[in-house]
Structure formats: structure tokens, C-alpha cells
Image (spheres, rainbow, N blue to C red):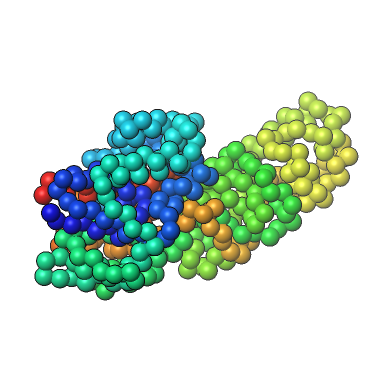
Amino acid sequence: MKKIIFVGGGASAFFCAANLDDTKYKIIILEQNADVLQKVKISGGGRCNVSHACFNPKELVQFYPRGSRELLSVFTKFQPGDTMEWFESRNVPLKIEEDGRIFPESNSSQSIIDCMQKEISAKNIEVKTQSVVKQIITTENGYKIITKEGEFDADFVVFTPGSSPKTLKIIEELGHSTIPAVPSLFTFNIKDELISDLPGTSFLNAEVAIPKLKTDESGPLLITHWGLSGPAILKISAWKARELADLKYQFEIKVNFLGIDKEDAEDLFNDYKNVNTKKTIGSSRIFDITNRFWHRILWLSKIDLEKNISQLTKSEIQNLLENLCNRKLKVTGKSTYKDEFVTAGGVNLKEINFKNMQSKILPNFYLAGEVLNIDAVTGGYNFQACWSEAWLIAQDLNSL
């Protein structure tokens, strides 16, 4: 019986192994950490954002800053609808939330972990944790995987260990070229009097632009202890991951907290003022923002909270609207988005056959997951790439 060795015990490895025909192969999963499926466990705040409800492959690939062209053919064979069917057929019901993200109905990542571990156990697949792979050597009949604990011979290798520098060095020694990995999906560190002491304040649909890179994104925005986060920030960090790394995470952003044009905001302000002539500006509720943030904006705009709204000067109104719709903030660094570390970079995609995820350089050698130069915006898309790539590998191996 031929042997398959998985290097890495994450989402791609387990999903691929769960779909293999174990009557054909002896299968071993090598994981360097004490626990497997660590990213699955922490995804979505511990709920596991399994995928996203985007069922058209041509639309789905639009959420991948790197790998969109290559993934199109992959998603035509296995897409989020197939992922949902796979888990639900194994008694793990899933739900689609309003924003399109897909989670288990249990709201616990453990449901996903238990499901895959059950599939693995049923197939008698051996899982070896704390097995750090130091080197992979090609042999006459396949591969020799060298770990600190010993050596393993393999007819087939499925390489899914993530994108750490050590991982990329192993694959480079085997002849693959790589693009250096840089962080993606990160929050912006900002120290500014506008947002200090306001963590937890959120905005439903803000706009964020990086003038130097001529790019912008919109979506929910969140003030954190360190600066700004939320989908608007995470999306822009993913699309411009490499450019922001080149800037050493020192740059200026322009934030529109209202998500509407300044002229429209001025119209809303004047309409409110005309109807509420006796209101103080501090007690006015004009825009969909918190009271604390409104008072901070007024303070920053040097407007007395007790001043009657009808007495505001044109310059005061313009200053107020500028701070709401065109506020410039200096970014001085980044913070990883929770513990869900995602990178841009990895194995050169030109060296992969996306019909089956096999290396074009190494025979019987498959790659999937974050080791590839593929990444997506937040929302379950990164996991979907893992499931789809892993499924293709399993189908190819099952057909041999």
C-alpha cells in the first residue's frame, strides 16, 4: 500500500485526508504543534467562519487579492455550496449570517474540528503532533521526510504547513521559487486625539482611503485600543499588503466616518438645524454615530457643546464636517487581526497545476493552503480556498 505524508495539520490537510480513499493508501499527518487545526479553532472569534455565501465562482474570486485567476477553475469544481453540503451531510448544520459569512449553527469551531477529526479517525489516519519537519529529500521512489523524531518515507507528499520562513526554505530547497511572505489582514496602529479612549466605538459604513497608494475601501469600522480595525481596514490591508509592507506601515489615511459625501452631510446638517433651531449642538442627533464620538468631534472642532445649533458659524460647520468626512490620521504600525494571521506571499503560482494542485516541478507532490501565494479578504474566503484546494488533491489521489 502506498503512503501519503501530510506536512502540516491544519484545515487543508484534514479536509484533504477526510476525502481520501483510505483503502488505497496509508496516510500520516505530521503537525509541528501540540494541537492540530489551530486556526480553525480561533477563526471567527472561536465560532469558525467556515466560508462565505458567494456561490458564483466568477464573483467569488473577486475577494482574493492574490490567486484570483488561478482559483477560478478550482472553484468551478468545489465552491461554498459544496462546502456547506459536505459539512451538513456529516451532521454539522451551517448558517448564513446577514453579511454572508457562514458559521456552524452551534456557534462553536469545535463542531468543525470534531467533524473532521471523526472523519480522520474513521479512516484510521495516523496523526503525529509535535513532529517538526526539518527537511524533505527526493528519493528514487518518492520522498524522505526528516523530522526531529525520525524519518518517514512517502510515495506522495501533501505540503500544507503554512508560510513561515522555515516552511518556505524547505520548499525552496526542493526547487520551488517563492514570493517573500508579508502580513495581510491586519489592523492599523494610530495614536490620535480623535480616537483615543474610545475603543469599541463602531461605524456601520465608513470609507477609508490611502492617498499615497490611490486606494480606498468601505465597510464597517471599529476603534480599538491601538487604532482602527473592522472590515474596511482589513480589506484595504489585504489588497495592499505588499505595498504597505514596503512603506514599513508608516503612512497617512483619510477616514470618512459617515460614509457619505461631505456635501450630503452638510445637507443633513442644515435640514436638522432648520427644524431644531433651539437645540444645543451637543444634544443634537444628526448623524448615525455615538454620543461620545459626536462630543469628541465637537471638542476637536473647538465647538462648545452648549452652543445653540442655529448660532454655529459657517467655518465651524465646515470644520465639523471636515473632521467627520475627511479626517486625516497617521498610521504608525500594524497589529495582527486577532490571532488569525494571514500572509501574502508563498510558492509561486506559476509552478502549480491548478487542475489538481500538484507541483509542476516535483512529481507526486501537492501543495495547498497558506504556503501558496494566495490570500483573501476577511469573511471565510481563506478557508474556502483551503477546502477547495484540498478537495481537488483528494480527488486526484483517489483517481490514481
Q: Residue at x 81, y 49 (%)?
A: 299
238 horizontally vs 134: left or right? right
Name, please, the residue furthest toward the top: 275
Q: Position of residue 158 (x, y in %)?
A: 25, 57
Residue 245 visible to an observer of this rendering: yes
Q: Residue at x 22, y 50 (%)?
A: 393
In which quarter of the view is residue 266 placed?
A: top right
Quarter of the image for the N terminus: give it. bottom left
Q: Position of residue 265 (x, y in %)?
A: 66, 38
Residue sitting nearer the eye, 373 or 216:
373
- Reply above or below: 171 against 310: below
Q: Position of residue 225 (x, y in %)?
A: 67, 54
Residue sitting nearer the eye, 219 or 352:
352
181 horizontally vs 16: left or right? right
Name, please, the residue furthest toward the right: 306
Name, please, the residue furthest toward the bottom: 173
* Labels in figure, total: 0
Q: Residue at x 45, y 41 (%)?
A: 110
Q: Position of residue 133 (x, y in %)?
A: 32, 67
- Reply above or below: 370 against 256: below
Residue 96 visible to an observer of this rendering: no
272 horizontally vs 365: left or right? right
Residue sitting nearer the eye, 59 or 224:
224
42 horizontally vs 31: left or right? right
Q: Residue at x 64, y 42 (%)?
A: 202
